[in-house]
Amino acid sequence: MHRIDTTTKAPDLFGSGKHGFRDGNPSSGTPATGLDANFFNAIQEELARAVEASGVPLDVNNHGQVLQALRLLIGTYDIPFIAGFGADGAGEDIQNRLWGSVVLARNITLEGEAGYLGVVATGQPLIVDIRKNGTTVYSALPQFAAGASAATPGQINPAAADCSAGDRLDFHVMQVGSTAAGRLLRLTAKARLR
């Protein structure tokens, strides 16, 4: 991106080397700032590339795309939880219980989660829950199938997705493997600022 640099710019309007625009004054013979293709192309490409980088397709009928792109590019808010780690960082059998709690500092919308189980559960799935102020945020809980290290995503209940600053999110393990409980669980709640 660059500032206007045509011969009719308003020199140093915003400080040294920071040129701007000026209205013309026919009575004094001062021309208005002239525009050129280079300036318009720079603005177009700076804005279009930000929108495209966010994954949003350009749409001539949508005048909110730059704001949408900014929210997608910088509005993420990840909340990590762990279970089945001992005080020394070594793995320990996961138990059915509360494993972590956070108080939100911002308004967010929960979108899902990603999880990894370092030592898999066997016999039955390991099932987890995130609760907002004591109530689950899911309509279907995320789980790690028996023998699987990657989480099968849950389904966020749309009525529970919006969280406000001051809300408490608690991370619970609801069920462990029946043969081997599982160890070294990492789960990240994915959210967007709102």
Image (tube, rainbow, N blue to C red):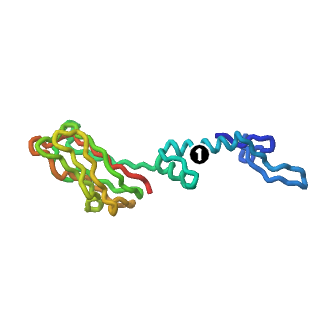
The correct choice, above or below, for 88 with respect to 77 in the image is: above
What quarter of the picture does the N terminus occupy? top right
On the image, the x and y values in percent for residue 179 come to 9, 42
Q: Nearer the viewer, residue 133 or 2?
A: 2
Instruction: Identify the amino acid type marked 1.
Output: Leu
On the image, the x and y values in percent for residue 61 come to 57, 55
**Residue at which label 1 appears:** 47
Helix, strand or loop at disc 1? helix
Quarter-wise, where is residue 16 in the image?
A: top right
Looking at the image, the residue that sits furthest to the front is 60
The correct choice, above or below, for 112 with respect to 53 in the image is: below
Viewed as shown, does residue 160 lie left or right of 1? left
* Residue depicted at 10% across the width and 45% down the height: 178
The correct choice, above or below, for 158 with respect to 145 in the image is: below
User: Is residue 16 in view from this perspective?
Assistant: no
What quarter of the picture does the C terminus occupy? bottom left
Quarter-wise, where is residue 169 in the image?
A: bottom left
Viewed as shown, does residue 30 lie left or right of 63? right
User: Is residue 162 in view from this perspective?
Assistant: yes
Q: Nearer the viewer, residue 56 or 12?
A: 56
On the image, the x and y values in percent for residue 135 come to 26, 62
The correct choice, above or below, for 118 with respect to 25 in the image is: above
On the image, the x and y values in percent for residue 111 come to 36, 52
Label 1 neighbour load within 10 Å: few <14, some 14-19, many 20+: some
* Residue depicted at 78% across the width and 44% down the height: 9
Looking at the image, the residue that sits furthest to the left is 179
* Residue depicted at 78% across the width and 51% down the height: 22
* Residue depicted at 34% across the width and 56% down the height: 103
